[in-house]
Each structure stands twice: as C-alpha cells, then as structure tokens.
Amino acid sequence: MSFTVQAMAASGSAEGGGFEAPSPADFYQPLIGSGQWAFTRPMLLMIISIIFIAGFLIATTRKAAVVPGKGQWLTEQVYNFVRNSVAQDTIGSKEFIKYVPLLFSLFMLILVNNLFGIIPPFQYPTFSRVGFPIGLALLVYVIYHAIGIKRKGVAGYFKGLIPSGLPKGIYVLIIPLELITYFITRPVTLALRLFGNMFAGHMLLLLFILGGQYMVLEGGPGLKVAGIGSWLLAFVMTVFEALIEFLQAYIFTLLAATYIADSLSNEH
Amino acid sequence: MQGNIAILGYGLSAIGPGVGIGLIFAAYINGVARNPETRSMLQSIAILGFALAEALAIFGLVLAFVFR
C-alpha cells in the first residue's frame, strides 16, 4: 500500500486537517490507463504469482530425488497436505486423485496471492478485488455442477438435490431452499468469503498503520505514544493476517472439495 | 456526530457468527480433549463449520460498504 501511504501523507500535511480513514477506493490502483479498461496492480500481481508458482514448481520437481532437497521438500509437503488432508479426506480414497490437480492449483494460487498481502514489495492481496475471487468461484461452480450432471444425468442430478425419505408435503419448502443453496448461496459465499477476509484484513492493517502515522506526525506527545502503540498492533495484526491468509486458502480448497464430493455422492 | 449507520449493521451481523464460531471451536476443543486421536478428523469439520458460520459476518461487512 505504499502508493496510498504517500498519497495520504501528502494530503495530510498539505491540508493539516483531520484524519481521513482509508476507504475501499484506496484498493483501486490502476498502473496503465484508467476507467474500466485499466491495467491494475492486482492484475500485475496475478501475473507475477503465476510466473512465480510455475517457476517454483518446475524448479523444485524437475530433478526430483529420492532424498528431497529443501525446495522439493516444501513442494512435497504442500502437495501432500492438499492430497491427503483435503482431497482424500473429503472426496474419498476411490476417486479423489482425479481432482487433486485442480485443488492443488487452487490452493497454490490462492496461498501465494494472499501472502502477497504481507510480503513487502507486493503488499496487496490480489483477492481483495472482488473480480478475482468471483472468477475462481465461477470455475468451481461450473466444475461441481458439470461433475454432478455427468455422473447422474440432468434429471438424476436435480433429484439428488432433494434428501430422500421426506414426506411429500415438505417438498414445497425444501425444493426452493435446496435450489437457492446450490445455485446462489454456494458460489456467492465462496467468492465473498475469500474477498471479504482479504479486503477486511488489509483494510485493518491500513487503518492501524495510517492512523499510527497520523498520530505520530500530527499529534501531541501523548498521541505520539499511542501512534507507536498502533504500529506495534499493526505488526501483531500482520502476523495474524499471515494465519488468516493461509486459512482462507485452505478453506476455499476444502469447500471446493466438499462441493465436488457432494456432486459425486449418490445420496444427498 | 457524522457517520454511516450501515456500519452498525455490520456490528449486528457479527454477533451471530461470533457466538456460532465460539460454539464450534468449544465443541472442537471438547472433542479433542476427550479423544485426542480424533484431532485430524475433527479439524477439517471444525474449520468447515467455522467457514460456513463466518459467511454471515462477511455478508454484513460487504453490505456495510455497499449501502454507504
């Protein structure tokens, strides 16, 4: 957020007025062009992340050894984590291997882009712009419906959405509820959860750091101490953010695996 | 005093998920304390429940910025 810090510092010292809290508009940072067709900072970060992930994975697995080196060990750990504790536990040991590449790619992409939120030269979580999580959620949305329809046929898939063994009268209630769950709530929450966590977390860091800066630069002696306290808290929140960023990558992958498992299973 | 009342909506929408997430992790800790071997199995269930409960608070946060 170095752009914003400079902008805020400039405006703060020029006006000498009150503190302006960071707003969602601070997340819009076009690099080339402006308006709807701008090439923005998160786009650049997404490209960098893809190049980085591809380069890292190729470099660490090209000369795979029986006794792994540091890089290969790290890749194997991440892969084993996604393969065993996400894919195998959720989808079941019979068919999970087909979906491991998808889940591993999702996990790596989200993890690296989230960690960009606290790594100094980047410091912008790509998924705090809502378009990126919507893209990933749409991908998962299409995939889990396609898997279900391919497995059970269109009629069978829609029949499978309704829990069996219910009295006929309750269908009036349950059918709209299930349709809303599968076609609206799931993709929307999948996208919004990732977006909301990244956005809110980064906003929190921004508020603590900019607030601390304002208090140290403009405030009296008491406020200067409070400003330093605010910076310390920003440091603690950064560590907390690292945890949240990992957790969100895990949750997104876990939910994608759960939805796929749900489409594959025979009963509701 | 100036401000945006939508922020209060976020505060209200955070109450329910807050209580819910607390209950989920209380049950998780309870389960692990009683039977430590189930830890890895309970962990993914607990985090799944946490993610579902948290969605409501995230809706509140997003809507607080939408209706400004």
Image (cartoon, rainbow, N blue to C red):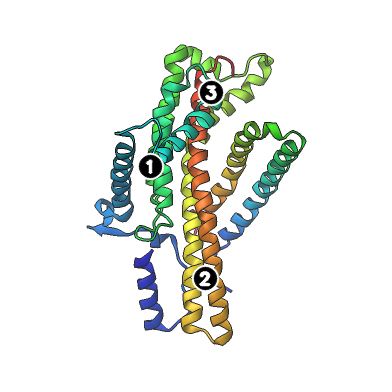
Q: Earlier in the sequence, mark 2 or mark 1?
A: 1
> In the displayed structure, would residue A253 be above or below residue A171?
below
Cα distance in 3D space between marks 3 and 2: 45 Å
Residue shown at 50% from the left, 56% from the top: A201
Kindly identify which residue carries mark 3.
A262
Nearer to us of marks 3 and 2 is 2
Identify residue type, mark 2: Trp
Determine which of the numbered discs, if any, sits on residue A71 in the image.
Answer: 1
Label 2 packing within 10 angstroms: few (<14), some (14-19), many (20+): many
Q: Secondary structure at mark 1?
A: helix
Residue shown at 59% from the left, 45% from the top: B54
Q: Position of residue B35 (x, y in %)?
A: 74, 33
Identify residue type, mark 3: Asp
Label 3 packing within 10 angstroms: few (<14), some (14-19), many (20+): many
Determine which of the numbered discs, if any, sits on residue A231 in the image.
Answer: 2
| A64 lies left or right of A78 | left
Q: Residue furthest right?
A: B34
Residue shown at 67% from the left, 51% from the top: B15
